Amino acid sequence: MSEIVLHAPFAGWLAPLDAVPDPVFAERMMGDGVAIDPIEGVLRAPADGQIVSVPASAHAVTMRLDNGVELLIHIGLETVALAGEGFIARVAGGARVRAGDALIDFDLDRVGRGAKDLITPIVIASEGARLSIDAIDRVVRAGEPIARVAGARAETVVSMSAEVATRILEVVGVNGIHARPAARIGALLKAYTAQVMLHHGARSADARSTVALLALGARQGDCLRAEARGPDAEAVLEALAAFARDRFGDDAADAVATTPTSTAPGGVCASPGLAVGQVLQFRPAIRDVPRDGEGIAQERAALADAIGVAASSLGRGDIADAHRALLDDPALDQAAQRAIADGRSAAFAWRSAVEAAAQEIERTGDAMLIERVADLRDIEQQVIAVLLGEGPAAAPKLTPGTILIAHDLLPSQFQALDRTRLSGICTAAGGPTAHVAILAASAGVPMVVAAGAAVLGIPDGRTVVLDADAGTVDDDPGVGSLAQAESRIADRRTARAAAIASAHEECRMADGTRIEVFANLGSVDDASVAIGAGAEGCGLLRTEFLFLDRETAPDEEEQTALYRQIATTLGSRPLIVRTLDIGGDKPVPYLPQQREDNPALGQRGIRLGLARPDLLMTQLRAILRGVPGDQCRIMLPMIVDANEVAQVRALLREAMAQTGRADPVQLGVMIETPAAAMLADQIAVEADFLSIGTNDLTQYTLACDRTNAAVSAKVDALHPAVLRLIGQAARGGAAHGRWTGVCGGLASDPLAASLLVGLGVTELSATPAIIPTLKAAVRGLTMDRCREVAERACAAHSPEAVRAILTEDRP
């Protein structure tokens, strides 16, 4: 076909498409092109042709040149979110235009304030078109020639190295490959170029696709065949194998937290609690979407914009990360692009892609994976709302004491509810590991799931008793049942209110003994929540969140700023920063390590720090610079003996000299190995404090891998052997005047408080949400009673016997 000259649609800086800060354009997902950063507010036709479409928001235009090539011009980035503000279209679809004709007027200042960036991509959207660009990176005038475009071109075949590697991976995580592991696999693979496929029986999945990974239906104990093709095939499989041994980054605690606590014929407990209230049936309307599109380029641009807006509106946390991974999923994108190429609208294409993915997951028959379909439905609705120019669907109007009943509930729908009027939730479908269940549990809202279709027939306004602990909904309670439920609710409310009211007071036992109650943190947001809950400091800052899911290690400045921000949030309260606890079980691309058959016993924690003193020294300096005065405390993970502490003490002195820090800084250790517990009296000579990590101490003491389903049930921190080691560690520290705390999971169990205090522990570092209840439990104790409980527990023969002692002792 004939070659057509493209003229600059407005004056500005002509840049390569690579300069556009959006991968959809920069990576040429929509096609080749150029970009202009405009200095005037009139978009003109770059050549003769016909207007294909202009969206209602007037932020873009698609035109067909006289040689048949379609051209998309997209004014700025994420400008669809402006909903037309600042734009005036001068043409409509079907209009014939000549080069230089005004197409769109826009307010340069107004659009510039609202856009992510004003740089404007000019993209060749037709398959097989050939673009030749004139001199780049220069100022151009409106109407000045900038490129030439021709029609058909020969296909270019990009060949990949024929090198292929395979590996068998065992799925060890309790919940198999669900949304979070799938998203984290995709994040891990970003550092590699090889194509990676996972095969499970007759099913196969692109390992970079969250949706495809979910559809594998891989459960705990399944074996997958991983196949990598490319120059770094062996390296990517090595990293993937190590990641598989670490449950693909899925914390074992998550599996415990999402296990249903009880079931009944009515349903399953997703979030514990008891509620009495009036029913409101929630039946959200399904948005209508246009079937046919207004041109391939236009619809592709609209979908890319909408996905970008939806992604930017997500917050932080595992659920947001899982949704973000789904929005970025290549399988969903490819399915939607195929539908758009067939003439469908962006909204119709997106809905079709999501529906196909949902059906694929449902065909696995895996109940837990099917719960992830709600996440797909959620991102479907969010993107479609943007495409239609609508806000989120209106939340149901609740009255005080509402028991909301629905077929299922999406995470975004839950977040839109008025919690002050919500007493409980019951869904006919869903499951206890669904993300909405996690949100409900975090908010303290009782929730029953999988209750069956019968609950959808309970009329609005009827008074019901929702007993989430039992997994039941009584839709016809008698007077006696109502009175009993109200009494139980009142007792719980009174106890909780009292705990919250005194949560910010100093924690002392009934006999005056001081017990510090700190919080375990993993972010700045955690610090704010902890202070609000009454935490007296941070007993464990997990710094791994700074180092994971990235291609390079955080530098000293980034670390310093983060530690300073958390320290400021805590005020003058103590901040115990644990040095990097990472190793073969948590692979990162910038830290190459040899394969380890048993990463839990390999180069992790302080062992890695001493093997890589450059990383450790950078972190020590950042901590010293970011956390001031006596607030600053440093803790070392996976210590075995005093020699390791002495080595780090020498590095700390060097770091203090380099940063000019003169005031003393406490250096403590985590007691996570039986060796450290038994040698605590020696370690206490070098360390300023001890903190017991009961999770690792338990698995190492009992020789039971907590990720191994065959033995994980035996991993119980209340085992008498573990308790005796805790007592020995506390006595070893006390012999040298060192305090001993607990920052492991056992510290977050109020029932265990008397036992830990009786063993000699004087500081408990727990999850922020439990702090008010934990403080209330400690205030009811006396030291004599605690020591008696500890003595009986250490003499018991099993964890079950210990638990019975604690239950019997509970006031």
Image (cartoon, rainbow, N blue to C red):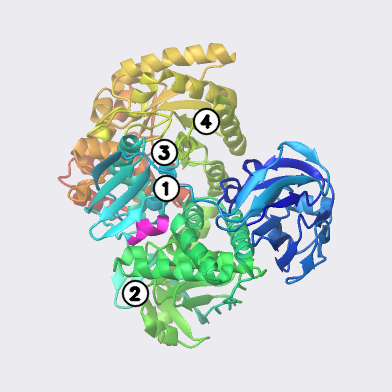
What residue range appears in magenta? 210-215
- Which kind of residue does numbered mark 3 sit on? Tyr
In the image, which is nearer the foreground, mark 1 or mark 3? 3
Residue, disc 3: 192
Dot label at residue 267: 2
The mark nearer the N terminus, 4 or 3, is 3
- What kind of element bears circle 3? loop
Image height of 688 relative to 175, above or below: above
The mark nearer the N terminus, 4 or 1, is 1
Answer whether labels 2 and 4 touch (C-beta < 8 Å): no
Which image quarter is the C terminus in?
Answer: bottom left
The mark nearer the N terminus, 1 or 3, is 1
Dot label at residue 450: none
Image height of 100 relative to 756, above or below: below
Question: Where's residue 420, x and y in %?
Answer: 59, 67
Residue, disc 1: 186
Q: Is 733 included in the stretch rendered in magenta?
A: no
Identified at 50% across, 76% down, the residue is 404
In the image, which is nearer the foreground, mark 4 or mark 3? 3
Can residue 490 be seen from the camera position used here?
no
Which image quarter is the N terminus in?
Answer: bottom right
